[in-house]
Amino acid sequence: MRIIVVVGARPNFIKVAPLMPALAAHGIAADIVHTGQHYDSAMSDVFFDDLELPQPRWFLGVGSGTHATQTATAMVKLEELLGVELPDAVLVVGDVNSTLAGALAAVKLHIPVVHLEAGLRSREFAMPEEVNRLVTDQLSALLLTPVREADENLIKEGIDPARIRFVGNIMAESLLRSLPRIEARSACARYGLEAGRYVLATVHRPENTDHPERLSEIASALRSSPLPVLFPVHPRTRPRLAEHGLLSSTHGVVLADPVGYLDMLSLERDAAAIVTDSGGIQEESCMLHTPCVTVRRSTERRVTIEVGANRLVGAWRDKILGALEEALSSSREWPVPESWDDSVSVRVAQALASGIDPLPGV
């Protein structure tokens, strides 16, 4: 079997890292195509280095733009590539625009689509990622799910259970395999911070960055944190902060450039708590036993709340501070969700090796 793996953004790189050697071990030939959705070194190159990922065979240079522009450009370039290569299957990962573009391009060429991390739902249709998830799942011949709830979501939406395989969370495997490499790493010291004595914050989702009142509430909460806050600023967030004057008063908040995967894991591990709107960081904080506060209206990672690792609040200063106080006083003890282990990539490879039935009528 020969497959092409589509990646385009930071979360994709993390999820694919443990998968490539597992596919090779099962006799599955796999090449990576990087759409270039994240194209600067801070959001792309450094992750390939940190994760020891093989360099992509193809780089499409899609770049930035509106959701429609980015998805359409990736789809056109992927269609051209797939039409020449004609792999046995295309594997897409997660919920970014490159995920949807890969699924659309492949299915129109009658190439089976495999969706890794299928079935997650936030029920928030204002999120572009939710739209990407829903459409990609309907187009996929094989759906590989990270949590049991995802199986239930797909079945409720009419997906044939024969197309669904519960494999566990591939991001958890990446983290577990990286732990030895961060054991002696103390990224927080670079910012003059002490392990266990700071809050880590990340904000990048449009529901927060594109609404000045929400971004202002989050910034106000961070400035009022009982502990210093380290805030690695996403490229799309920094101009929003500047535009609305939220960079002028940074009392107690250390603004930093984006960091690589290993440094980010070190910062997450050593933080007293995390304030974020990132889906991946919700999962990573759960694995690292660092309490998390999620500043969103909903989350597709509800399992992190169910086990006690995460607290979901909207972008309201007082609610964020209340949840942060609770997080800082929590025990940091909770069970790791089912099959968030170091064998996810093996289960994925086994599912692929067992065969992929095409969609009806194809």
Image (spheres, rainbow, N blue to C red):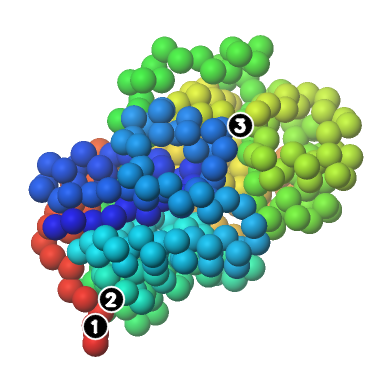
Residue 193 falls in which quadrant of the image? top right
Residue 210 % position (x, y): 75, 55
Identify the residue at image location x=80%, y=32%.
223
Residue under label 1, please give it.
Answer: 362
Give residue 258's mark: 3
Identify the residue at image location x=61%, y=42%.
276
Front one among 8 and 121: 8
Q: SS of the residue at dot 2?
A: loop
Identify the residue at image location x=41%, y=28%.
50
Q: Are marks 2 and 1 in contact (CB under 8 Å)?
A: yes
**CA distance for labels 2 and 3:** 39 Å
Quarter in which the N terminus is drawn: bottom left
Task: Please indicate, yes or no, whether residue 269 appears anywhere in the rendered image.
Answer: no
Q: Earlier in the sequence, mark 2 or mark 3?
A: 2
Tell me: residue 249, above or below residue 302. above
Disc 3 marks a residue whose amino acid type is: Pro
Disc 2 marks a residue whose amino acid type is: His
Q: Earlier in the sequence, mark 2 or mark 1?
A: 2
Residue 96 % position (x, y): 50, 57
Residue under label 2, please give it.
Answer: 110
From the viewer's perspective, tell me whether residue 29 is left or right of residue 323: left
Rate crowding at label 3 as few (under 14), some (14 to 19) or many (20 or more) other CA atoms within 10 Å: some
